[in-house]
Amino acid sequence: MAKRRVVRVDHHRTMHARYVEGITVRQLRNGDTQTVAALFGRLGARSRELRFCGAKPRLREEELAALARVDGDHHVLVAYVDGDAEPAGMARLVRDGASAEIAFEVADAHQGRGIGSVLARELASDARAAGITELVATVCGDNAAVVSLLKRVARSLHVTWEGREREFVVGLER
């Protein structure tokens, strides 16, 4: 069984750092554009294309501010690995009633090491605790890693295609 140390989590106001499988996961502070920009800088062109459904050489100031928003409807987790002071990954959800749109990004140097999986499990756990029953993810092109990640956290899964994008509705029913 994976080593998991969890500090009490209050999903409405404050979340303390958690240490899961060698990865420290904490909530992004509202307005922390520096952390968002640091992770964006660690994404290669292909990772940015898959995450943003097209070329994205830079983030505009308003995009950066939106990605750094944390409030009652916006929840963002940041992952760090031991020995690396920069963010290794990020997962966010934007709540809409009992549903939430989600997105993930993992720095190129850390892809394939389980960071996305840890973030997905922790985000799904936080969502369940907050009463969210389904997550919605728009996946661009053929992103097999994200599809696999979503299947691992889903209790049920519904997929629709629109152009080159797939929309996944991930059921979190207990």
Image (spheres, rainbow, N blue to C red):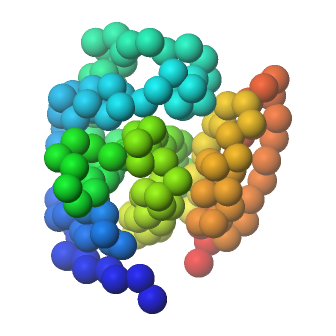
Q: Is residue 163 above or below residue 107?
A: above
Which quadrant of the structure image shows residue 153? bottom right
> Which residue appears at 37% of the width and 46% of the height?
89
Query: In screen coordinates, is 148 left or right of 9?
Result: right
> Looking at the image, which is closer to me, 86 or 93?
86
Q: Is residue 55 above or below residue 102?
A: above
Q: Position of residue 39 (x, y in %)?
A: 32, 34
Q: How many marks?
A: 0
Evaluate whether residue 102 shows in this view. Answer: yes
Which residue lies most toward the bottom here?
A: 1
> Which residue appears at 47% of the width and 58% of the height?
113
Q: Position of residue 62 (x, y in %)?
A: 31, 14
Q: Position of residue 128 (x, y in %)?
A: 47, 67
Q: Position of residue 59 (x, y in %)?
A: 36, 15
Evaluate whether residue 11 shows in this view. Answer: no
> Which residue appears at 61% of the width and 43% of the height?
137
> Which residue appears at 17% of the width and 47% of the height?
85
Image quadrant in which the C terminus is located: bottom right
Image quadrant in which the N terminus is located: bottom left
